[in-house]
Amino acid sequence: MERRFAGRTAIVTGAAQGIGRAIAGELAAEGATVVVADLNETRAEAVAKELGGSSFAAAVDVADEGAVAELHRHVMERTGRIDILVNNAAIQPFTPWDDVDFAEWRRIMRVDLDGVYLMCRKSSDEMRRSGYGRIINIASNTFLAGTPNMAPYVAAKGGVVGFTRALSTELGPYGITVNAVSPGLTASEGVLGGPHEDSFEFTKSLQSLKRRAVPADIAPAVVFLASEEAGWVTGSLLNVDGGHVRH
Ligand code: NAD
Ligand code: 4PL
């Protein structure tokens, strides 16, 4: 196994399960010290243990400015560096748009958009100091498709793509790349057993590739963008959805 990430520290938010967990696994397998950053501390601890090596768990609510600052203090104290940030944590509610009240709209924005801002704001300070960084924001193909019953989520993910482009401009001069990946419907723990489970058959009919995506289908694209080899790619959106929206 190649060890492209030996000596690197990678923060992966929402890594206690699903797509984040798959990304954390691939980065750790190639030598990264992965910070399994998640609201769910118990599951994050279990994943960190499974990753082994120098990886560790950290409890964080990405929507809480103080908690994000504390996470960064903790990671810097433990590893002295932040090379890779994967903003993967998000909530994916499914509600007819006119049943979403303003409080619910704000809750989704806080986690899915503000959380990405808060994490980028703090991690990029450390990346600027070292003159190297890789930021990968997990968007969604719902932004490209305008998927029904997810209006606040689609809006937040559109914000993530816009912020990715703006931040790539701001951080390029410091040797930091900023990219986004947009998965399509994927069988994560969060999706299985939830309201999106019923969408698999219809989504499969729209995809070029006729099966369900699993987290392992998404992780390699993220790992590529986290690698040194992706150094000339920035401000991009890489769509990974089996040919659903064909972006
Ligand atoms: P999931 O629901 O299975 O897991 C999400 C993880 O994030 C959980 O461990 C949860 O505890 C954590 N989390 C939630 N809110 C948090 C917060 N405020 N702070 C810290 N951690 C928090 O998710 P998934 O389906 O694997 O999705 C991962 C990413 O991929 C998300 O950004 C999602 O929007 C995106 N995505 C998913 C799909 C899909 O179909 N699964 C499709 C496109 C995009
Ligand atoms: C196509 O990001 O991309 C449902 C739920 N269907 O969260 C998503 C599709 C969902 C998606 C998503």
Image (spheres, rainbow, N blue to C red):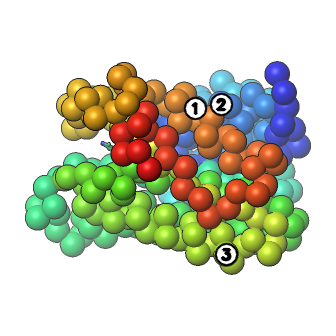
Q: Quadrant of residue 169?
A: bottom right
Residue drawn 66% across the image and 24% down it: 50
> Where does residue 235 sit, x and y in percent of width and height?
62, 64
Q: Position of residue 112 (x, y in %)?
A: 42, 60
**Secondary element type, mark 1:** helix
Q: Position of residue 142 (x, y in %)?
A: 34, 52
Q: Amino acid at mark 3?
A: Thr
Neighbour tally class for label 2: few under 14, some 14-19, many 20 plus, Cα within 10 Å: many
**Residues at circles 2 and 1 in contact by the CB criterion of under 8 Å:** yes
In front of the other: 67 or 205: 205
Drawn side of residue 212 relative to residue 198, left or right:
right
Label 3: which secondary element:
helix
Mark 1 neighbour density, 10 Å: few (under 14) some (14–19) many (20 or more): many
Mark 2 vs 3, N-terminal side? 2
Question: How far is the residue under mark 2 from the one under mark 3?
Answer: 30 Å
What is the number of the mark on residue 22? 1
Disc 2 residue: CB within 8 Å of ligand 1: no
Mark linked to residue 25: 2
Please state which of the two labelled residues, at mark 3 or mark 1, is closer to the viewer: 3
Snapshot quadrant of residue 80? bottom right
